Image (cartoon, rainbow, N blue to C red):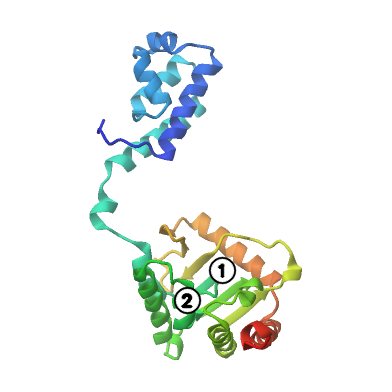
Amino acid sequence: MPKDFRATTLERAVGRQLAGWRNERKLSLTEAGQRVGFSSAKLSMMENAVQPSAPVDVMALGYVYKVPTPEWQAVLLRAQHAERVRASTLNNALNFDPAADFANLVFEASRMCAFTTDLVPAVLQTPRYTNAAMQNDDPVRIVRLAMVREAWATRLNGKDPLVVQVVFPESVLRQVIGGPRAMKAQLLHLMEISEHPTVSVQVVPHSAGAYPAMGSPFTLLDFPHRQHNDVAYLETFIKAEYVEDPVLTEQCAQRFTSLQQLALAPGESLELIAEAAAEPSCTGVR
């Protein structure tokens, strides 16, 4: 075990399960250790995830505790996966960063479905709006967002334009980012670009109440090649992530469809954006 070992959340979950098995059988660490041939210290470290739980040890405990086969097999699979993740240095070696790669996917995709909760979707932001929204963020992220906008812009009027469908709550229109002038320019840009035949902008009004995927922004990309699965892109200020499991991307697609059904139609959304652009908070008039 490396001196700098830090248990993953999965390894900690495995440890809790092992402790649960022992406690259900009302065995002390010493008694359980004697039955399986471990020292009580080793068993304690496994249960508390102070050291990894080797799959063979998990199997031995499942056998000694007489845990039902499906149950110990499930925990065994988790331990095996945790072991593979820890042993693999592939991600570090490749240094693959989805946030840095995202602009490439935007350039390759045939359709983008973006749901945001607190900002205008990245592809529809003006540079001034982006700079104001990210003023306390990593400068590299601002550059990457600019690359995403450019990847979309290069295709906007091309032979194979990217279809862009976005949904966001009405609160995005009321949050003044960068001051009244910058926000009004952003809203006017939204109004202009929403009239493009490949762009659909829909707003979820305040009156809708709770809505699907509330608080969970995501972007879903479709691709023209059938060998390429849909990809969901999730990003926070800490990290970005691609989700490629078809079951999970289908859940994203279903949520997005539900959002579109709940949101105002594109024409009504355009009217709401125009109203927000005319409000005192955007005109600067008090």
**Image position, residue 65 (x, y; %):** 47, 16
Residue depicted at 47% across the width and 70% down the height? 222
The N terminus is located in which quarter? top left
Secondary element at image label 1: loop
Residue depicted at 27% across the width and 40% down the height? 87
Amino acid carrying label 2: it is Ala
Question: Going by the image, does 31 lie left or right of 188?
Answer: left
The answer to whether residue 47 is above or below residue 158 is above
The answer to whether residue 266 is above or below residue 248 is below
Sequence-wise, the earlier of marks 2 and 1 is: 1
Q: Circle 1 sits on which residue?
A: 116
**Image position, residue 107 (x, y; %):** 39, 77
Q: Which mark is residue 100?
A: none
Of tags 2 and 1, the one toward the viewer is: 2
**Image position, residue 199 (x, y; %):** 55, 83
The answer to whether residue 94 is above or below residue 172 is above
Residue depicted at 46% across the width and 24% down the height? 18
**Image position, residue 114 (x, y; %):** 53, 71
The C terminus is located in which quarter? bottom right
Q: Quadrant of residue 171?
A: bottom right
Secondary element at image label 2: helix
Residue depicted at 34% across the width and 12% down the height? 37
Question: Going by the image, does 19 lie left or right of 107?
Answer: right
Distance of label 2 from label 1 (alpha carbons) = 17 Å
- Give the camera-side residue of 231 and 184: 184
Q: Circle 2 sits on which residue?
A: 132
Q: Residues within 10 Å of mark 1 (few under 14, many from 20)?
A: many
Amino acid carrying label 1: it is Thr
Question: Going by the image, does 118 lie left or right of 280?
Answer: left
Q: Residue 110, can we see it? A: no
Q: Quadrant of residue 279?
A: bottom right
Q: Are marks 2 and 1 in contact (CB under 8 Å)?
A: no
